[in-house]
Image (spheres, helix red, strand yellow):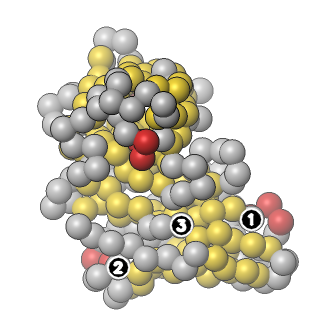
């Protein structure tokens, strides 16, 4: 089965840029989606299809995907961005969905 | 507004069964595939199962295959998850989530319902 690898944690100073990676074999050939989950809340889709922002998601959130790595970039990070972030792809050979292990973003 | 509301969680003994429900509103339920996703305490998200918009196809994770069954009643705008032979490792918050128009991303999530498997 397809495996997605994320760093367990990323730390960033307020106002700086956070980059969260998601590794997978030839992930650039797949569509990658990113979810934000704050404590006690359901996940929220923040980036779909590698780089599309759903309605209501700030422009500070962006995404890219190439080769074996997809990246979620959050610019001008604030305390409100502290959350767990998960990448996800569709393994269409099995019609299964796959999540990365999640990355905890800490704003210093 | 577009909404998914789960119910049916609780505490159940190992080996017993439980059925979760997910009531949809605010969108055309019959146009979307719907998924179950779970999250064990302090752990990450785990995809559980999907059912196509018309119920014609269902797929589930290996960890629940043969024990959990996903179904839907389009006349009631409701999704179900029948969970049999429950194990301690099934303890988790269970979310229902709508697949987007391409069936790829999860664009709407419910608030989740907690299932605890314990003697």
Q: Quadrant of residue A31?
A: bottom left
Q: Chain of mark 3?
A: A
Left or right, A30 with reference to B106: left
- Determine which residue is flagged by label 1: A82
Secondary structure found at label 2: loop
How far from the left and from the top, in percent, is residue B11?
Answer: 52, 26
On the same chain: label 3 and label 1?
Answer: yes
- Determine which residue is flagged by label 2: A24
How far from the left and from the top, in percent, is residue B41?
Answer: 57, 49
- Determine which residue is flagged by label 3: A102
- Outermost residue on the bottom side: it is A67
Choose mark 2 or mark 3, whichever is in front.
Answer: 3
Marks 2/3: CA–CA distance? 14 Å
> At x 43% / y 77%, what residue is drawn?
A5
Is residue B24 at all visible to an observer of this figure? no
Left or right, A79 with reference to B90: right
Residue B75 vs A53, above or below: the answer is: above
């Amino acid at each position: 089965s397809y495996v997605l690898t994320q760093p367990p944690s990323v730390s960033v100073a307020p106002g700086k840029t956070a980059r969260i990676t998601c590794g997978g074999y030839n992930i650039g050939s797949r569509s990658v989606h990113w979810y934000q989950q704050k404590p006690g809340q359901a996940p929220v889709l923040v980036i779909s299809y590698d780089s599309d922002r759903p309605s209501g998601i700030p422009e500070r959130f962006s995404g890219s995907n190439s080769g074996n790595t997809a990246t979620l970039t959050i610019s001008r990070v604030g305390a409100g961005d502290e959350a767990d972030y998960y990448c996800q792809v569709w393994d269409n050979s099995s019609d299964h969905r796959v999540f990365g292990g999640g990355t905890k973003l800490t704003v210093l | 507004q577009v909404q998914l509301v789960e119910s049916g969680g609780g505490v159940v003994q190992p080996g017993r069964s439980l059925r979760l429900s997910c009531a949809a509103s605010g969108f055309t339920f019959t146009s979307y595939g719907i998924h179950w996703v779970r999250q064990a305490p302090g752990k990450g998200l785990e995809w559980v199962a999907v059912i196509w918009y018309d119920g014609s196809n269902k797929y589930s994770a290996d960890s629940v295959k043969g024990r959990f069954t996903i179904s839907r009643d389009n006349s009631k705008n409701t999704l179900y998850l029948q969970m049999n032979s429950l194990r301690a490792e099934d303890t988790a918050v269970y979310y229902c989530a709508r697949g987007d128009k391409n069936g790829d991303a999860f664009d709407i999530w419910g608030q989740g319902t907690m299932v605890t498997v314990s003697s």
